[in-house]
Image (tube, rainbow, N blue to C red):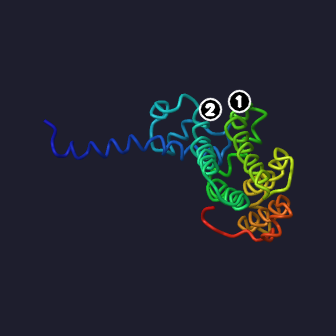
């Protein structure tokens, strides 16, 4: 017969077991950003998560699968949520685009996951498989999402006619540069970059470049309101 002590202990064991994947992902993210892909060892991930290496293998077959899980949890999931928002959004396209750019910073840029793009860029030559994965599950879906938003604005007469695919690359480049700077030369710089100001200036520039003359007459190009949701 189970004693009251073992019965009480069992739920704690269950909670611990259920928490292990998230603890492993958090430990892996920290080590990938700190040491890079090549420099991260599964032994170190397990040790930082407080579990055995054997326990890690119960959830992830190898380092590549662990890295993919980290990216899916911290970046791909946010892209999927943004896609759902865009599908159901009915308001002003400029506000939607500004919201997505701000949320990108809050959900990715201002988190430990901000170090992932630098890792992929710097190690893609030695590990093309993680580069292909990142293109397929992060870059391409994000580009399609933003291009779709720009095309929406053009259809509604809110944005002027532009090459949406190319414009998305121009939109994303300064955001990626902000992350690369933050995880490379930024800590050595004498004049720190204010990321919030950087983002707001970039949003203003993007919307000035996109707004149609009719939309500009309705609302000044620089009048991007701060809000929690579009």
Residue at image x 60%, y 62%? 229
Q: Which residue is mark 2?
A: 64
Residue 87, horizontal then vertical, whole percent: 63, 47
Q: Residue furthest left?
A: 1
Query: Which residue sits at x=66%, y=59%?
Result: 91
Q: Disc 1 versus disc 2: distance between alpha carbons? A: 9 Å
Crowding at dot 1, Cα within 10 Å, few <14 / some 14-19 / many 20+, comes out as few
Using the image, determine if residue 207 lies above or below residue 24: below
Residue 107 image position (x, y, % from top left): 61, 55
Mark 1–mark 2 contact, CB under 8 Å?
Answer: yes
70 to the left or right of 131 = left
Quick check: 185 above or below 201? Answer: above
Residue 20 placed where, x, y %?
A: 44, 42
Rendered view: 59 above or below 98:
above
Of callouts 1 and 2, the N-terminal one: 2
What residue does disc 1 label? 129
User: Which of 193/212 is in front?
Assistant: 212
Few, some or many C-alpha atoms within 10 Å of disc 2 (few <14, some 14-19, many ≥20)? Answer: some
Which residue occupies the foreground of this view, 205 or 189?
205
State the image quarter where residue 97 is shown.
Answer: bottom right
Residue at 80% x, 55% y: name it.
174
Which one is in front, 95 or 7? 95
- Judged from the image, the secondary structure of the residue bearing numbered disc 2 is helix
Q: Quadrant of the N terminus?
A: top left
Q: Does residue 13 appear left or right of residue 163 in this picture?
A: left
**Image spot of residue 58 (x, y percent):** 46, 30
């Amino acid at each position: 017969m189970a004693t009251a002590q073992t019965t009480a202990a069992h739920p704690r064991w269950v909670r611990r077991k259920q928490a292990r994947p998230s603890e492993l992902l958090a430990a892996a993210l920290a080590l990938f950003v700190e040491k890079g892909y090549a420099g991260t060892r599964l032994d170190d991930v397990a040790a930082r998560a407080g579990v055995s290496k054997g326990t890690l293998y119960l959830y992830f077959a190898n380092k590549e699968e662990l890295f993919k899980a980290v990216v899916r949890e911290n970046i791909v999931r946010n892209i999927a949520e943004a896609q759902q928002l865009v599908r159901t959004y009915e308001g002003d396209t400029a506000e939607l685009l500004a919201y997505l750019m701000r949320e990108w910073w809050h959900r990715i840029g201002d988190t430990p996951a901000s170090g992932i793009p630098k890792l992929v860029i710097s190690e893609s030559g030695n590990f093309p498989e993680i580069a292909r994965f990142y293109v397929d599950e992060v870059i391409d879906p994000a580009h399609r999402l933003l291009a779709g938003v720009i095309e929406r604005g053009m259809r509604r007469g809110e944005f002027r006619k532009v090459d949406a695919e190319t414009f998305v690359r121009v939109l994303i480049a300064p955001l990626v540069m902000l992350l690369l700077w933050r995880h490379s030369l930024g800590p050595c710089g004498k004049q720190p970059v204010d990321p919030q100001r950087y983002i707001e200036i970039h949003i203003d520039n993007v919307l000035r470049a996109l707004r149609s003359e009719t939309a500009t007459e309705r609302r000044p190009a620089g009048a991007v309101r701060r809000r929690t949701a579009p």
